[in-house]
Image (tube, rainbow, N blue to C red):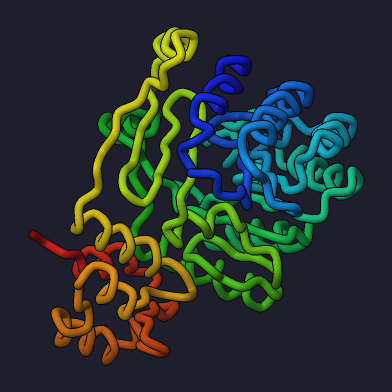
Amino acid sequence: MIRMMAEEILLQRDYLEGESLQTIYFGGGTPSLLDPSEVRLLLTAIFNSHPVSPGAEITLEANPDDLTLARLRDFKSVGINRLSIGVQSFDDEILTYLNRAHQARTAIESVDAAVKAGFENISIDLIYAIPGLTEQAWDRNLSDAIGLNPQHISAYGLTIEEKTVFGNWQRKGRLQPVAETLAAAQLERLMDRLSAAGYEQYEISNFAKPGFQSRHNSSYWRGVKYLGIGPSAHSYNLISRQFNVANNHLYLRSIKEGNVPCQVEILNRRDHVNEYILTTLRTDKGCNVTLLRRNFGYDLLGLHKDYIRQLQSHDLVTIEDESLRLTNAGRLLADKISSDLFLIE
C-alpha cells in the first residue's frame, strides 16, 4: 500500500499545476502506525514530485498509545514538524465508552514525550457532547488539556453516524444523543475556558496559541487547492473534486496499471457559493461578501437583507470590513445560519 501511494504521488504530480506545497498532512486513519521509514518514503516521493516551500507545515495524526519517545524522535528526524494527537478525553470511563485503546495517563505521557522529543507544534483533539459527560467532567477535561499547554486544541461534538456502533445503539434505544442545550453549554464553556487561557478561536472547533493556527486546515476553509493520496482520498483543484475509490484491492490494482481510480465531480456555481459560505462562516475571518459578489455574482447582503438584520438584532452576526461574521452566540447555530444563506437554484 505504501509503495502504491508513493506511485500515486508520481501519477498525480501535475494535479496542482506546479504550485509550491505549503502543508503536508498524514491523516485519514492511523498514520502513527506507520514505521518512520515508511513516512520517509512518502515524503521523498512528495519532494521528488512537487516543489515544497521551505518551512512547510508537515503534520502527523497520532494515537497516544503509538507514541514512545523513540518513535517520536524518529518521526521528527524524517521531517514531521507538527503532531495532532487524538487524546479525545482525559476520563478513562469516557475513553472506554468511546472504545479508545489508550487511557488518560497514556495521553498525558504522549504529549510530554512529544515535548521531550523536540516538537514545538502540538495539537490535541477533544470530544464533547458525549452521553454521560457531565458539565463538571467536561470542565475537568478542559483543565487537563490547558495544563498540558499544547499549541493547538481541536474540540468536536460527538457525531453519531448511521452505520456505526453508536448508530446501531441509537436505533436499539441503548444510546440517547445529548440534549442540544447541554452540547451548547459545553461548547460555550470550551470557548470561555480556552479564550481565558490564551487560545484564539480561529474556527468553530479549532483553537490556537498566537502563531499556531493549523495552516493545513485553514487552507481547506479558504478554498485552496489540495491533493489527497490513497484509498478514499479527496482532492480539489478549484474546478472539480475527485474521490479515490475506497476499496483497497481496487485501488492497488488500478495504481499498478498506472491509473488513478477516482470519480470526478465538476462544481457548478451553486456548489462554489454554498461551500464558500459554509466554510468561511465557521472561521474568525467570516464570509467576504465582496468576494462572493465579484467571483460568483451572489449578492449575499442584498438577497438576505431582512434575515441578516434579524440575525444582527439577536447578536448572532456582525458585518465589518465587507465580511459577515458569527458572534459566539451565532457559532452555536452555525450550520443553520449557513444553510439559510445558501444559494438555491
- Residue drawn at x 60%, y 45% is 88
Name above or below for residue 266 compared with residue 40. Answer: below
Q: Image quadrant of residue 323?
A: bottom left
- Residue drawn at x 14%, y 79% is 303
Residue 285 drawn at (x, y percent): 47, 75
Callout count: 0
- Residue drawn at x 83%, y 44% is 114
Judged left or right of residue 150, residue 237 is left
- Residue drawn at x 70%, y 75% is 198
Name above or below for residue 321 compared with residue 109. Answer: below
Single out the residue that lies furthest toward the left: 345
Judged left or right of residue 271, residue 60 is right
Q: Quadrant of the C terminus?
A: bottom left
In the foreground, 94 or 71: 71
In the foreground, 38 or 129: 38
In the foreground, 227 or 106: 227
Q: Image quadrant of residue 183?
A: bottom left
Residue 100 drawn at (x, y percent): 60, 32
Residue 241 drawn at (x, y percent): 33, 41
Q: Quadrant of the N terminus?
A: top right
Judged left or right of residue 341, residue 326 is right
Residue 89 drawn at (x, y percent): 62, 47
Name above or below for residue 155 compared with residue 190. Answer: above
Judged left or right of residue 163, residue 133 is right
In the foreground, 235 or 137: 235
Q: Image quadrant of residue 315?
A: bottom left
